[in-house]
Structures are given as C-alpha cells and as structure tokens.
Amino acid sequence: MNTNKSKAAFKEAIKHIPGGVNSPVRAFNSVGGNPLFIQSAQGSKITDIDNNEYIDYVGSWGPMILGHAHPDVVEALHRTAENGTSYGAPTLMETQMAELICEMMPSIQSVRMVNSGTEATMSALRLARGYTKRDLVIKFEGCYHGHGDSFLIKAGSGALTFGTPNSPGVTKGTAIDTLTAKYNNLDSVLSLLEQYKDQVAAIILEPVTGNMGVIKPTDHFIKGLRKACTDHGTLLIFDEVMTGFRVAKGGAQELWGITPDLTTMGKIIGGGLPVGAYGGKKEIMDMLAPNGPVYQAGTLSGNPMAMAAGLTTLKLLNTTEGFYEELEEKSAFLAAGLQKNLDELNFPGVINRVGAMFTLFFTSEKEVNTFSDVMKCDTERFAKYFRLGLQGGIYSAPSQFEASFVSIAHSTEDLQKTIDKSREALEQLI
C-alpha cells in the first residue's frame, strides 16, 4: 500500500499546524505510522490522497450514520448554500430542528443549538450551576466531554490516548470544583454526594462510554444515579454527543429508560457539519439568556448549513421504516463475526457493543466494564492490529480508547470483508 502522498502532506502540515493535525488523535501517535490524508468519501468508503480505498468505521467520529455524502444531505446543503451560508439571525430551520429533537428525545422540552459538543457540555454545566446555585460537578474517570477545563480531569478520548488526562492550563480552582467518581461504581458517587452535601450542581456522564472504548452501564449504576440526583437536588446530565440518535432513536436514555435533567448532543444532529446542542426540562432551560440570567451565545449557532444537513439526517432517521432495526442487524453481524474470530483463534480480547458503536479491547480480562479494566489493555498489540487493518483496507479508530461506528451504508460484503481481514490480522499477531 503506497501512502507517499500522505507522508509528504503530513511533513508539510507539521510546519504550519501543531503536530500536523487539528485534533490530536488524528496524528496516529498511539498506533504509529503516518496519518492518512483523505480526499473523498462515499457511502461506507473513504479514499486517501494516494487513491487507497478503505471501509470506514470512524465515520467522522460518529456523525455519518447514513454513510458519507448521502444524496439527500448533499442536496440540502447545495440548496441552502445558494441562499447564503450564515445570517446571524433566526431561521425557520432552527425551530424545525428543535421540534424534531424534542419529538425524538422526549426528556428534552427545550433545546439550544451551539457549534460543537464541547460547547454544549460547557454550556450545560454553566446552566446547571446557575440553576442549582452550586459550584461542584461530578464526572467519571475515562469519560470525555470535550476540552472544556472542567472536563480535563481524568478524561478519556485523546487525553487518555496521549497519557495526559490532566491538562496543563487547567487552573487549580477549576480542578477543585470537579470531583471524579468511578464509572459503574455507584458507591463512589454516593460517597461524594454525602461528603459534599448540598454542594454538587450536576453529575455528568456518557451513559454509554465511547471515549475509553464502548462500555455500557449496569442497571444498578445508571438507575442509582437517577435516584441519587433526585434525592440530593443534583442535576443529571447525559452527554449523548456520541450516543444520541445512534444507539437508538431516543439515544441511550431510551434504551435504559432514564430521564436526565439535561442532555448534550452533537455529531449526528449536524449531518457531518460542526454542531452541538443541549436541552432538557423547560424550567431549567428558561434560566438561559434572554429569558434568564445564565449567559451563553454563539455567532454561528444554528447556522443554516448545519441545520440543513442535520435536519435532513434526523428526518431520515425518524421516518425511514425499520432503520434502527437494520442498523442493529448490521452491527450485530459484524460483532458476532469478530467475536467468532477471537473464539476460534483463542485470542485474548473482548468486544463491547451497544447499537452501532463497538470496541475490540485487546485484553486478557474476561469483561471490560470499568476504567481500570480499560487500562489493562495491550495498546502495543492494538497498534499492530490497527496497522494490519489499514493494509487490508479497513479504517478504524486509531486508538484503543475510542469507539468504532457502523453506518446504514455498510453492506454485508463490507462487513464480511472486515471480519475476514480482522481474522488475518489476528493470525499474524499470534
């Protein structure tokens, strides 16, 4: 596989961009080798500037649930761009988007659009503090909620990949206001709530983690969080930037039957364009300016391009009969094939999957349910597996600590080829 053009492009990028990339995990530091520079994508495939084609399981880190360059989304963008790309003023599409989000995710009675998942989580925390008149927040080891200062305390995603979960530049004051609990360990939360009684504004978590790999919550844990928040007057915030409209039409909160007080969203609701949103109970959301005293604003919030792509995507998800059932079948088929490879080769590994999100953990553990389980993974073996996958035409997340994603555009042929190439890679690693 010739990647000379990508190698040359990376050398040039390093001269002008820190690390040569605009988001750290793209640099391939944790898997070795050279990042691929992509020139185009269509359906389930991406093509790099050396004209190598790959079956894509990154999907722009989650948004491309319909596949790349879906014709309806592309047409909506063309039509919208002809009328202008940004006004800094209200549009009808913003209201239509808000109505559809509230319909598909009933815990949300009111929603505000922003420009990224990070902006959504930062804003949701400020709102929670303003509403409760409390300062402290509880997050979980390995959960990533964007690069806001409050969240870079024992964080997941790129912070975990690069071994720097506590970032320089985060002040001591901010760190003091952020308490850290253990995911899937309810007692660690209850002890903090008791220790800091009547001081905790919110608990924020990825209901299904994706930024330390895919881990699902136990019923005891997730239902216990809801009760604990209610008992202590603390807001429960679900970060569904990744899981929202992916693991189910109504997100992870639909699967587990939990009603959070606030929800953050992103990725899919932009149809591949930069976007974020946060919403919840109207009583809480009405604390936002101009209705209330909690200030948050954004020049490009709700811009027509993102609204056009996102609204088109959500409408297709909401109205296409059997969409989520078909996506579940595809995802289950792939996971079962990967699991069969592990079993038949007696290869140490665990596959975790929720809906169209999955992670293959390279570990001798029988299960991966916690942050400490994740930290036992063999990252060197994963890196070798990743590079073998690329050589076989499979593009997956370039980190052991990330989720991979299935789209509706992945064909049975794509999935079977992925299973076959995975087996070949595992055989070479034995």
Image: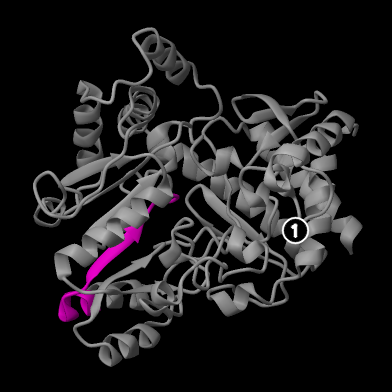
Residue 269 in view of the camera: yes
Which residue type does callout 1 highlight? Ser
235 is higher (above) or lower (below) than 245: below
From the image, which quarter does the C terminus lie in? bottom right
* Percent coordinates x, y for residue 219 in the rendering: 35, 73
Whether residue 230 is in magenta: the answer is yes
Scheme by which the image is coloured: one colour
Q: Counting other residues with Cα less than 10 Å from the Cα at mark 1, is it few (<14), some (14-19), or many (20 or more)?
A: some
Residue drawn where x is 38% and y is 39% of the image? 115
89 is higher (above) or lower (below) than 423: above
- Residue 316 placement: quadrant: top left
Whether residue 183 is in magenta: the answer is no
Q: Secondary structure at mark 1?
A: loop
From the image, which quarter does the N terminus lie in? top right
Residue farthest along the top direction in this orientation: 82
Q: Nearer the viewer, residue 250 or 276?
A: 276
- Residue 127 placement: quadrant: bottom left
* Percent coordinates x, y for residue 337 in the rendering: 68, 51
156 is higher (above) or lower (below) than 398: below
- Residue 15 placement: quadrant: top right
Q: Nearer the viewer, residue 64 or 8?
A: 8
Q: Nearer the viewer, residue 67 or 14?
A: 14
Range of magenta residues? 227-243
Residue 241 in view of the camera: no
Number of marks in the rendered image? 1
* Percent coordinates x, y for residue 2 in the rendering: 90, 31
Residue drawn where x is 80% and y is 23% of the image? 51
Q: Nearer the viewer, residue 199 or 224?
A: 199
Left or right, 249 with respect to 99, comes to right
* Percent coordinates x, y for residue 14 in the rendering: 76, 41
Residue that badge 1 annotates: 30
Residue drawn where x is 80% and y is 34% of the image? 12
